[in-house]
Image: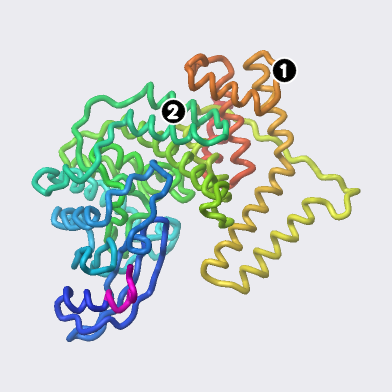
Amino acid sequence: MIVDFESALARVLVREIPGCKRLVSIERLSGGASQETYKLIIEDAHGERPLCLRRATGGVGTAEDDDLRESIGLPTEALLITKAREAGVPEPEVHYVLTEADGLGSGFVMQWLDGETLGARIVRSTDFDSVRPQLAGQCGEILARIHAIELDANGLRSRLPVHKPEHLVTRTWERYKRFNTPQPMLDYAARWLLDHLPGGEEATLVHNDFRNGNLMVDTSGVSAVLDWEIAHIGDPMHDLGWLCTNSWRFGRADLPVGGFGSYDDLFSAYESASGRKVDRERVKFWEVYGSFWWAIGTLTMAEQYRLGSDRSVERPAIGRRCSEGQIDCVNLIAPGPVTIVQATTLRDDDMPRLDELLVSSRDFLREDVVGSTDGRAQFLARVAANSLDIVLRDAALGDTHRRLELERLRALFDSDGQLVDLRWQLVNALRDGSMPLDHPGLVAHLRNTVANQVAIDQPRYSGLATALAFGKLAAKR
């Protein structure tokens, strides 16, 4: 147990960081379920300078009930950063890895780097206009260097898990099956993935979370690759597919590489630097898997709210993003025309109407609470206002959406069953294989159901615009 965290850390820094005279200040920047990040200011002979500390939460971390993320541990993460830096990957220098004797738990101290990490800003800010066209090529070169890191010579093979495609798909599918929610598109995607497993490919180091949002960018380009905590040994195309997954394009569906570049720029740079030919179908498999994985990841967060492990307003809001991952799967493996239902008008004789109650509450959060708060409270007020927008859209669209979904399900099964029962019937038929993926009407049903759910959950999500564009294109043909 740490009696005085700051004093213990100061002693370690003076002892282990060359020239360090004292710890001037410490600022906690973030704290997730398993990681804490601190900005440290130390004093040396040249004055004050910053360092970064990454530490397990409370020094020991927490065992999340989430086997979708298999953390390798901070000592191994520090080793990966060091070996990647030696291989020419832009990384901070790791100065010191904490030991048990330090009394600070698991973690490491590294060089402080400045740059932008918010994916939306990297995609949209004019600060990066000049460098944005170069980022896809830089990512290709960086991934080539990561995949070339020697596993045996660097002691990594014994410290990293090995994950084959089938294992990742089945493990993720099983995770979803433990939730009491029938989401037929997820079962369809799982079946598709298992039917399209990539064949034998050499196994390399895989970063496993290489995406816009985990890259630090400055005016010269990518300045650091962050968050190595779920690295593994596996298919190198996994990293390319994850980078291109639509969730990490931040609204720029037309620029598939992180919302800032093209497939051609990424693939040509990777092939040139690695000598390895990019299999585009293999990359597509990992894009589908990435959307499938993220959709189930959002359900995990909703489950944390329901179980009480995290009762913040953010968790159920993220859970509603499940439909985003599903529409991306639709666009990749079941594209075609969709019809979005029209809003119904609430009764004027109600005083006040439900939508008026919701709008007044939403506007209070968005205009008054957001304006009078900052930091985490301000962020959560925005989330709460957005959740009320979802309720408003459901009030306007939900009844018609669900009525049409029920009609399609009854036609599929020639049944007069009820909505939830028929959803489960479809899910179970997909899981036990009795419903073939090419069953008449199945794909159209899934496509329209998911598209209309996105129209309620997040109508501005780029995947919905892509789905609607498929319909317009089909109509022209």
Residue type at numbered disc 1 = Asp
Query: Residue 254 appears at what percent x and percent y?
Result: 44, 43
Query: Does residue 100 sit above or below 231 in this rendering?
Result: below
Residue 190 image label: 2
Return the residue nearer the eye: 434 or 85.
Answer: 434
Q: Which residue occupies 40% across, 42% down?
A: 245
Residue extending furthest toward the left: 153
Q: Quadrant of the N terminus?
A: bottom left
Return the residue nearer the eye: 325 or 307.
Answer: 307
Q: Quadrant of the C terminus?
A: top right
- Residue 114 visible in the shown view: yes
- From which residue to which does the magenta span run? 1-9
Query: Residue 59 appears at what percent x and percent y?
Result: 33, 63
Q: Badge 1: few (under 14), some or many (20 or more) residues near its Cα, within 10 Å?
A: few
Magenta span contains residue 2? yes
Say whether residue 210 is left or right of residue 358.
Answer: left
Q: Earlier in the sequence, mark 2 or mark 1?
A: 2
Residue type at numbered disc 2 = Ala
Q: Which residue occupies 20% across, 55% down?
A: 89
> At numbered mark 2, what does the secondary structure look like: helix, strand or loop?
helix
Residue 416 image label: 1
Say whether residue 334 is left or right of residue 261.
Answer: right
Count of labels in the image? 2
